[in-house]
């Protein structure tokens, strides 16, 4: 394969990053992500591990260097370890990463390290046992904290926490979460709640902006902006005299689409060209119609022509996107 980037969209953006949702199911029901009662995709409609590996291989051949496995909760899908082993062998993929709620991490961390996973993002929105139960509806805080400790002991390049902050819910814990990250020498990103899917609360009321998070942290810590472009919606700050960086992920307040470098594969095989729009192609259909590897690569190259210029999130017109984050792969 040629070394030059082959996945370039109409706006000249090079796509180097693929996020793969391996399941829409989860052992938690976080209030901002899911409804209490969810209809999940029948298992027969999920991409098999062989199909995911074929698609990931095509992306690797086309120059994609970073893959993130997400969901739903990826570590709840049976036999997931075998997928990591396959993806860990892809030639061009230098960064194989995972986003997880941490509930199964104590069991899996070492195996993931062996398979070639480089980095893990772990979601943690609160350090209070009862609040964790309320926010996740089914989760146990201690299980996630234990998972974090086991992963830390395995020596991954970088472990990062992800926290969604909601007004009048966990907005009083911003600095407690930062202190926890500092104590564990982890980075921490704060994500603004996105209007993906119908849920039980009014997102316009719970919305808490990244700027508010930043102000809260600056009351206690000295921060230095880090001039780093990731092709994503994050701004980074180093906390003085620590090994911890703060990330602020703000799809509403800061337009990041101009540098977008990513596409998403849903668990049922839709290639989504934008998190906040519906433009997609059905790679499962293409595979099940018997496409050769050349045809699969060509379909992916062609899809670049329908990647939209940007998203159009609007909290007042919610939900503009009917997919929950768990179906898309956050
Ligand atoms: N289950 C895993 C986890 O929680 O880390 C991976 C999937 S989850 C959908 C990925 C990330 O999306 C998590 O950090 C979660 O907090 C975030 N998330 C879920 N729904 C969201 C929403 N509506 N707005 C912003 N972030 C959301
Ligand atoms: Fe599950 Fe992650 Fe969604 Fe929480 S955010 S319900 S852990 S998929």
Image: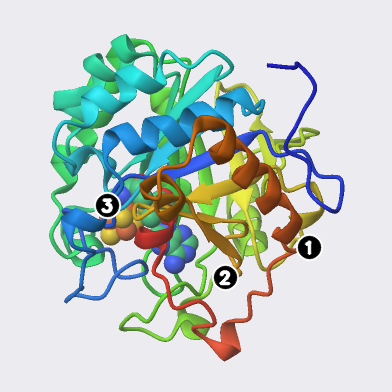
State the image coordinates of residue 29 (x, y, percent, origin top left): 22, 64
98 relative to 262 in the view: left or right = left
What residue would you read off at disc 2?
Answer: 278
State the image coordinates of residue 1 (x, y, percent, origin top left): 68, 16
Label 3: how many Cα within 10 Å (few below 14, some 14–19, many 20+): some
**In contact (CB < 8 Å): disc 2 and disc 1:** no
Q: Quadrant of residue 116?
A: top left
Q: Which residue is nearer to you in this view: 90 or 29?
A: 90
Q: Residue at x 43, y 43 (%)?
A: 20
Label 2: how many Cα within 10 Å (few below 14, some 14–19, many 20+): some
241 relative to 306 in the view: left or right = left
User: Would you place residue 196 above or below residue 79 in this image?
Assistant: below
On residue 309, which mark appears?
1
Label whose residue precedes the other's in the sequence (2 or 1): 2
Let me know if residue 295 appears in the view.
Answer: yes
* Distance (Cα) linking label 2 and label 1: 12 Å
On residue 46, which mark appears?
3
Label 1: how many Cα within 10 Å (few below 14, some 14–19, many 20+): some
Q: Which residue is nearer to you in this view: 306 or 193?
A: 306
158 relative to 255 in the view: left or right = left
User: Would you place residue 317 above or below residue 248 in this image?
Assistant: below
**In contact (CB < 8 Å): disc 1 and disc 3:** no
User: Would you place residue 28 above or below residue 242 in this image?
Assistant: below
On residue 102, which mark appears?
none
State the image coordinates of residue 154 (x, y, percent, origin top left): 30, 12
Badge 1 element: loop
Q: Residue at x 32, y 24 (%)?
A: 84
Q: Residue at x 67, y 25 (%)?
A: 63
């Amino acid at each position: 394969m040629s070394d030059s980037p082959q996945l370039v969209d109409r706006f000249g953006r090079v796509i180097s990053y693929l996020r793969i949702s391996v399941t829409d199911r989860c052992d938690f029901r976080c209030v901002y992500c899911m409804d209490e009662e969810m209809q999940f995709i029948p298992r027969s409609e999920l991409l098999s591990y062989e199909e995911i590996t074929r698609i990931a291989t095509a992306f690797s051949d086309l120059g994609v260097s970073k893959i993130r496995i997400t969901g739903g909760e990826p570590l709840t899908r049976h036999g997931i370890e075998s997928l990591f082993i396959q993806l860990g062998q892809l030639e061009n993929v230098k960064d194989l990463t995972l986003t997880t709620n941490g509930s199964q991490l104590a069991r899996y961390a070492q195996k993931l390290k062996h398979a070639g996973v480089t980095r893990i993002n772990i979601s943690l929105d609160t350090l209070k046992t009862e609040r964790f139960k309320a926010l996740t509806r089914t989760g146990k805080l201690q299980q996630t904290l234990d998972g974090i400790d086991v992963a830390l002991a395995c020596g991954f390049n970088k472990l990062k926490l992800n926290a969604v902050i909601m007004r009048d819910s966990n907005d009083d814990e911003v600095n407690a979460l930062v202190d926890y990250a500092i104590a564990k020498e982890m980075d921490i990103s704060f994500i603004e709640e996105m209007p993906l899917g119908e849920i039980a609360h009014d997102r316009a009321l719970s919305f808490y902006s990244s700027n508010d998070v930043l102000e809260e942290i600056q009351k206690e810590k000295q921060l230095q902006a880090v001039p780093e472009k990731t092709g994503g919606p994050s701004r980074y700050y180093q906390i003085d005299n620590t090994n911890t960086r703060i990330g602020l992920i703000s799809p509403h307040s800061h337009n990041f689409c101009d540098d977008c470098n990513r596409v998403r594969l849903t668990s049922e095989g839709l290639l989504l060209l934008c998190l906040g729009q519906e433009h997609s192609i059905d790679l499962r259909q293409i595979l099940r119609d018997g496409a050769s590897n050349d045809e699969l690569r060509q379909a992916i190259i062609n899809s670049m022509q329908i990647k939209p210029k940007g998203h159009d999130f609007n909290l007042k017109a919610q939900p503009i996107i009917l997919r929950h984050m768990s179906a898309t792969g956050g």
